[in-house]
Each structure stands twice: as structure tokens, then as C-alpha cells.
Image (tube, helix red, strand yellow):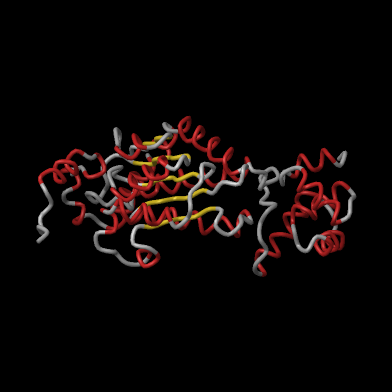
Amino acid sequence: MTSAFPSDDLRAQLNSLTTEAFRPELAKIDCLPTLDLARLMNGEDAGVAAAVAAQLPRIAAAIDAVAERMARGGRLVYAGAGTAGRLGVLDASECPPTFNTAPGQVVGVLAGGPEAMVTSVEGAEDSRDLAVADLEALGLTPVDTVVGVSASGRTPYAIGAVEYARARGALTVGLACNAGSALAAAAEHGIEVVVGPELLTGSTRLKAGTAQKLVLNMVSTITMIRLGKTYGNLMVDVRASNEKLRARSRRIVALATGAADREIEAALAATDGEVKDAILVLLAGVDGPTAARLLEESGGHLRAALAAAGS
């Protein structure tokens, strides 16, 4: 029978983690007025960006490595449990509409599966074998990247995912919020954003979760910039899957080209609604098929396609 109490070893581990530290000075925050609590939380959050800034060289090195592999057809896979895993799933799910990524190009695997997005799945985060099974189902290759995400840096699921991926020759990144973490040590690229003890002891959905979200934003967004998914700061690979995004597509073409509404509508019609192609049609004076060919030859980079067209 499994004991209901944590082992001495686990308790020692938790006691040593910055993210789990108790702050006596906050022991009576439940007695504070709501506005004071809000100010206190806001002040706590203000330090997160600085903690991320301290890791920017490591983050940039990881992104360059991810982008190099994705340019060769690799996938970006986030793996984690609880809040960390949910943040990975969130970031992955936002890539198709934002950057028109192909299905399965950016993936989030979560300990316990889809059910764990909305409810706790008992024991899932403690299983390295579960992580291996989830990644085996993806058929990892050496051009893929697995980013293990864990606030504590000790979550067996995240560490197991990184160790399995590394054994398969994939690129590995370990994102944690404690220094000297096992997760960062297991990965080729270790990123440790140390945000300090939480307002609520051990509630790592707070500062640690915010830090992880900021880093994952960087990983996906800058990787997509490196892959040519943007033109300047415009999302030229946006997928117009609803009326709002169709309006955004027209606005992006207008901002990039300065063309009149009638010209924009004609260019989008000639390119089956593809924003990047429509911009090329307008700026280079080519037809839709030629724009598609130039973009394919340039690996999807609009600036390179414009240069090839002599614009």
C-alpha cells in the first residue's frame, strides 16, 4: 500500500526549492484589505520580467537551435504536468491561427492527457514512463525539439520526456524556476528563471507560471520570426479562419503595402486569401502563382521572395 504521507526524501527536496519556500512576513495576508492584496500581488509580479531577463542569453541560444531544426522540418514539442504542461498546450494551440503552422508542427503533451487540462489526474506528473509513452506516440526524430517545462525542475514527467528525447537524438530544452534543477541538467539547453518564493506558498501557477508563459511566448514567437512567419512585426502567415481574422488579414496587407481596398481584395482573391502571397503580388507586381512559387523557393521568407522578384 502506498503511504499517504510524502517520503522523507521528497519532503527534503521540496524544502530545498525556492519555489516552495515559506515567507513568514506574508503569514497574515488574509487579514489585508483587497486593494492591499492586489498591490502586493502586482508588486510580486513586477520582478518576473527581470528574472527572465537574466536568462535571455540562454533563451536566445535555445531559440536559435529550435529554429534551425524546424527549418529542416522538425517539430516543437512542449512536455509538462499541471500548470507548466497546460501552458505548453496553450502555446502550441495558438501557433496554427497565429502563424499558420501545420497540424502537429507545434505540440503540447500534458501529463494525464487532455483530461488534465481541466482536472487533476492523480499521479500523472510522477510517471517518467507516461512521458515516454506520450513521446513514443509522436515518433520523435533528430530534427524535433522537446521542451520540458516544470516550475520545480524536479517533475518526473518533464525530466522523463527530456531524457527520452535526448536519447532519440532530438534537441532538448529544460525550463525550470529553481537554480540547479534536475530538469535543466538533463537538457542540452537549461533555462532557470528564478522568480523566488510565491505569494501563496508553493502556488507555482503565480510568478513561476507567469515566467514560464513569458519564456514560451519568446520560444514560439521568435522561432516563427526566424522561420519567416512574419514581415517586420506583421503576422503575414495568419490563418483567416473567422471574420475577425479575415479583417485582420486585409489590414495586414494594407499596412505592408499601402494599397487601396479594391487592390487588396483582388490580391487576396488571386492568392486564395494567403496574406503573404497577396503582399508579394502587390509589392512585386506578380500574379498569384508566381508569388506562390517565389515564396516556396525562398523557404517562405517574404523579404527573400521580394528580393528574388527584384523589389
Q: Residue at x 32, y 49 (%)?
A: 41
Q: Residue at x 46, y 39 (%)?
A: 169
Q: Is residue 256 left or right of residue 80?
A: right
Q: Is residue 177 above or below residue 237?
A: above
Q: Residue at x 54, y 42 (%)?
A: 143
Q: Position of residue 147 (x, y in %)?
A: 43, 45
**Tally of numbered discs:** 0
Q: Is residue 220 above or below residue 58?
A: below
Q: Residue at x 26, y 43 (%)?
A: 19
Q: Is residue 274 left or right of residue 53?
A: right
Q: Considering the image in quadrants, where does the N terminus appear? A: bottom left
Q: Position of residue 56 (x, y in %)?
A: 47, 33
Q: Considering the image in quadrants, where does the C terminus appear? A: top right
Q: Is residue 153 left or right of residue 223?
A: left
Residue 113 sits in quarter: bottom left
Q: Position of residue 126 (x, y in %)?
A: 26, 53
Please identify the residue farthest to the bottom as the structure is shown.
243
Residue placed most toward the observer, 110 or 128 = 128
Q: Position of residue 220 (x, y in %)?
A: 53, 47
